[in-house]
Each structure stands twice: as C-alpha cells, then as structure tokens.
Image (spheres, rainbow, N blue to C red):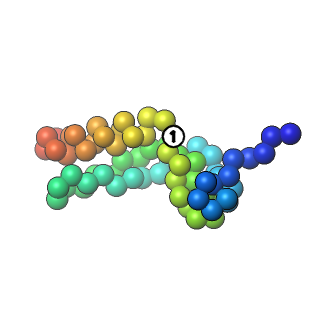
Amino acid sequence: MSTSPRCPLCGGSLEPDREVDQVVREGDDVALVRVRADVCGDCHEPLLHPGAATKMIAAADALRRGQA
C-alpha cells in the first residue's frame, strides 16, 4: 500500500502536477514564470518539479540582458 506524498513543511497533502507562477526579479525588472509543481493543499507551498529552476534562471538571464 502506497501513501500519498506529504508536504515537508506542514505535513499536508500535496496536489500533484499543477502549474504555478513564480516571481523572478533582476534589479528593478520582474517576470512571472509558469512552472510545474506539487502544491500543498494546506499551506499552499509549491514543491517545484525538476527543470523549474532552469526555467527561472533563464528568465533572470533574459531580464539581465534586457530581452524580457
């Protein structure tokens, strides 16, 4: 019998594979990046999926270069 994953912060149930917007700031510039995450149903903390950080870093680099 498998148990559903729990939130590491509060122990709540995770809602798997949701799209969430993450804020990326670079200086005075701001971008919203949509990434995949499991989200806690209690505290709403997103647990980002692999690749999310890469996408956020690419957005920060684009902001830094003035291309976003």
Q: Position of residue 40 (x, y in %)?
A: 61, 57
Depicted 58 relative to depicted 47: above or below: above
Q: Position of residue 65 (x, y in %)?
A: 13, 40
Give the residue type that dot 1 points to: His
Judge whether residue 18 can be spotted in this image.
no
Q: Residues within 10 Å of mark 1 (few under 14, many from 20)?
A: some
Q: Is residue 23 above or below residue 63?
A: below
User: How many dots with numbers?
Assistant: 1
User: Is residue 36 visible from the viewing direction of this image?
Assistant: yes
Q: Which residue is mark 1?
A: 49
Residue at the extreme left of the image, as rendered: 66
Seen at 69% across and 56% down, the residue is: 13
Q: Residue visible at 74% across and 47% down?
A: 4
Task: Name the quadrant of the N terminus.
Answer: top right
Which residue shows up at 47% across the image and 51% down it? 20
Depth check: 43 or 36 in front? 43
Label 1 secondary element:
loop
Q: Residue furthest right?
A: 1
- Image side of residue 2 versus residue 49, left or right: right
Horizontal and vertical percent position of residue 46: 52, 53
Q: Quadrant of the C terminus?
A: top left
User: Measured from the top left, where is residue 39 in percent x and y?
Assistant: 57, 53
Relative side of 44 to 55, left or right: right
Q: Is residue 23 above or below residue 56?
A: below
Q: Is residue 26 left or right of residue 8?
A: left
Q: Residue at x 41, y 46 (%)?
A: 34
